[in-house]
Every structure is written in structure tokens, then in C-alpha cells.
């Protein structure tokens, strides 16, 4: 496998391009998830940010995993359907979750920071550093005990995983500008939408098909993150399939139509569906509780004001009321398009019947692509 002109030590944020960017060529965001592929492109002018393109395709519900050949063909087909002229892309790291840590460092120059990051990464990465891609992003300048410091996100993944993704993108005719981390994409999207407030602690939960990511955000800065693999919205589909003896596609339809109230329905069929969903969702609730308890024990002086849900799994009707009752904290559903203008073409076609929470990641990637 050839890595091309990749700068391995800065690959997440600074992939050297083989060709110069055209003056009007705006990179687009590409989110490859467990449930499907999403593409978004935004533009910016004096009036604000506008969503110009949004296309997506879902993987088969029967598939436990997608091989690289199927993924490549699915990506090529989706690119053929969209009208995006640019071949420059900001993509998420697909197929594995990176190591991601948030640390505070003394204020220093960019050159000093680059040298320091490797030594800091060695403290929490147990693998051979020569086989890892390590990158960082300065999230905020802060003051701690009267001294100026940097709040930094440090990300790491194996070179093999990252270079394989770059190879896949280039086979699809794309040129990666950067490989991003979902967690940071959510942060970009949230800041554009003005979701976080000063002196407020918010829990941001991304419920995916096969995993859940939990972040605690303090005054707009991530301070705690936990990934829960092998737990996601597909668990509900499997529970309904087993309980009702139906296909996964039917289970998905039932899940989307069903309203997750805080009390069981009175009819027998409703009770069966409700109990199956609640039972399968118990593991998710328990993992969220564990994360909240850990944060509260670590920072007893802090109070969590609200929980924000995103991801395809947040499409369950009344899930916010259900979780709020069980967690004792206000819960709300994120609309990533709330403060972003929608082009007339998308208003007429692409967004009809679409669940907005599925597009938080790709929108964050598209926003990052603006630079």
C-alpha cells in the first residue's frame, strides 16, 4: 500500500495534497458510519453558513459489517448521485475508534507544542509509537492557578488504519484534506450552532447503530469522553426481531413509529414492543449513568445542567422524556441544522422525512472543511 505524499506525523489535520486546491473548490464532509454513508457540503458568505448538498445511503440492516469492496462501491455510487464537483474531502476516521485524550499544557509556541505532544502521548499510549499516527488540536487557551495554559485534544490511531482509509478514498477518486475524529466534528458543529454556554456543564451523547459516545462539555470545552462499543440502536432492532419473530427491516419500522413513553401502553401488542425496547435500552441507560457518576465523583463542585442527544439512535420518539425520567436530568434532541441556512433545492427534496440527528457528524466535517 502506498501512502502517497502523506505527512504521517500530522495526518489527521494536515495531509499534503497531490494537487493544488482550485480557487472555488470547497472540500465536502464525508461520514462513513456503521449504518451508512453521508455526504454534506456547506458554503459561507456574509449572510452565514448554507447547506448546499446533503446525500446519504444506508447499509443493509442484515449486514454485521461492510467489507472494503462493498464500501468502495457504495461510496462510488453515492458520489455519482450527488452534484458536488469538488473531489476534496474531510472524512471521519472509519472502522475504529481512535485513542483520544484531553490534556492541559503550559502555554507554548506551536513548535514547542509539536515536540511536547509525542512525550505526552507516550504517557497514555501503550502501543509502539512508531506504528501510530499522533495528532492534536488546541481547543482553547485557559487560565489555571493564574497561569496561561492550552487545553489540547490528542488523538492517535495506527498508521495502518489511517493509510488504508486514505487508500480507499483515493480509489473512489477523492483527495483527503484531513481525516477527522467524530468527537471533534461534533464539537465544531455544536459551536457553530451556539449549543454550549459559558459556565455550563453539558453531556453530549451520540447514539450510533453499534456504539455510543459520551462527552462531558464544560463551558464549551470537552473535559471527559467515554466510548461504549457494542451498544447501540441496533440492539433494539435485534430485541424486537427476537421478541416478535420478524425481520430486521420490520423491526426498524416499528422502532421508528413507536413512542417511548414513560408508562407501558395498555394494549397487549404495545406492551410487548415497549418491554422489548426498554429491556434492550437498559444497557445504554446504565452506561450513561456510570459515566455521569464518574464525572460527578471526580468533579463534585460541578453540576450537569442538561443532556444533548444526537446520532441515528436519538430518533426514538420521546426518548428525551424517557431518559430524563431515568437520569434525573433535562434531556433534549439536537437539531444540527437549526442555525444553518438550507438551500432551496434541499428544502424541496433531500430533507423531506429525514431525521436531522443522523447528520451531526457529517455536518461537523463539512464545517471543518471550510477551514
Image: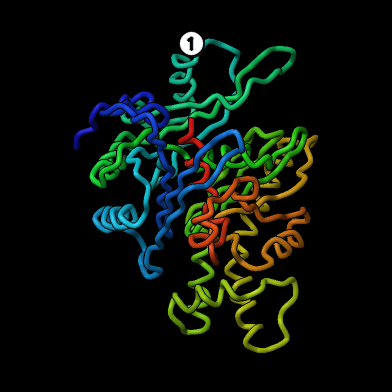
Give the SS element for disc 1.
helix
Other residues around mark 1 within 10 Å, as few (<14) / some (14–19) / many (≥20)? few
Total marks shown come to: 1
Instruction: Give the residue drawn at x 68%, y 39%.
Output: 194
Q: Tell me what residue is drawn at x 64 percent, y 16 percent.
A: 149
The structure residue drawn at horizontal position 53% and vertical position 54%, both measured from the top left corner, is: 344
The picture quadrant where one finds residue 167 is top left
> For residue 249, which quarter of the picture?
bottom left
Rendered location of residue 282, percent (x, y): 62, 64
The residue at which mark 1 appears reads as 112
Residue 192 image offset from top left, x and y in percent: 62, 38
Vertical position of residue 365 compared to residue 312: above or below: above
Residue 22: % across, % down: 34, 30
Answer with left or right where residue 338 lies relative to residue 129.
Answer: right
11 above or below 74?
A: above
- Say which quadrant the N terminus sits in: top left
The residue at the point 26 percent across, 47 percent down is: 172
Q: Residue furthest bottom?
A: 268
Q: Is residue 301 left or right of residue 20?
A: right
Amino acid at each position: 500500500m502506498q501512502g502517497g505524499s502523506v505527512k504521517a506525523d500530522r495526518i489527521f489535520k494536515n495531509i499534503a495534497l497531490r494537487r493544488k486546491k482550485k480557487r472555488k473548490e470547497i472540500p465536502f464532509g464525508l461520514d462513513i458510519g456503521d449504518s451508512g454513508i453521508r455526504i454534506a457540503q456547506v458554503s459561507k458568505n456574509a449572510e452565514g453558513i448554507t447547506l448546499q448538498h446533503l446525500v446519504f445511503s444506508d447499509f443493509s440492516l442484515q449486514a454485521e459489517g461492510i467489507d472494503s469492496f462493498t464500501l468502495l462501491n457504495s461510496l462510488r455510487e453515492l458520489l455519482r448521485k450527488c452534484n458536488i464537483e469538488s473531489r476534496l474531502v474531510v472524512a471521519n476516521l472509519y472502522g475504529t475508534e481512535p485513542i483520544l485524550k484531553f490534556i492541559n499544557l503550559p502555554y507554548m509556541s506551536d513548535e514547542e507544542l509539536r515536540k511536547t505532544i509525542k512525550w505526552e502521548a507516550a504517557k497514555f499510549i501503550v502501543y509502539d509509537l512508531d506504528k501510530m499516527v499522533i495528532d492534536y488540536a488546541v481547543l482553547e487557551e485557559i487560565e489555571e492557578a493564574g497561569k496561561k495554559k492550552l487545553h489540547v485534544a490528542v488523538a492517535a490511531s495506527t498508521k495502518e488504519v489511517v493509510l488504508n482509509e486514505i487508500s480507499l478514498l483515493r480509489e473512489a477518486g477523492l483527495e483527503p484534506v484531513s481525516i477527522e475524529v467524530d468527537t471533534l466534528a461534533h464539537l465544531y458543529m455544536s459551536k457553530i450552532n451556539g449549543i454550549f454556554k459559558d459556565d455550563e456543564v453539558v453531556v453530549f451523547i451520540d447514539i450510533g447503530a453499534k456504539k455510543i459516545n459520551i462527552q462531558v462539555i464544560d463551558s464549551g470545552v470537552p473535559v471527559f469522553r467515554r466510548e461504549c462499543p457494542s451498544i447501540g440502536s441496533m440492539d433494539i432492532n435485534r430485541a424486537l426481531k427476537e421478541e416478535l419473530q420478524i425481520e430486521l427491516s420490520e423491526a426498524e419500522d416499528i422502532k421508528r413509529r413507536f413512542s417511548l413513553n414513560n408508562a407501558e401502553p395498555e394494549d397487549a401488542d404495545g406492551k410487548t414492543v415497549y418491554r422489548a425496547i426498554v429491556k434492550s435500552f437498559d444497557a445504554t441507560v446504565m452506561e450513561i449513568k456510570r459515566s455521569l457518576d464518574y464525572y460527578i465523583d471526580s468533579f463534585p463542585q460541578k453540576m450537569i445542567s442538561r443532556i444533548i442527544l444526537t446520532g441515528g439512535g436519538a430518533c426514538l420518539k420521546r426518548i428525551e422524556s424517557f431518559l430524563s425520567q431515568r437520569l434525573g436530568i433535562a434531556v433534549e434532541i439536537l437539531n444540527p441544522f437549526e442555525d444553518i441556512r438550507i438551500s432551496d433545492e434541499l428544502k424541496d427534496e433531500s430533507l423531506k422525512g429525514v431525521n436531522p440527528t443522523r447528520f451531526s457528524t457529517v455536518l461537523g466535517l463539512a464545517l471543518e472543511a471550510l477551514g
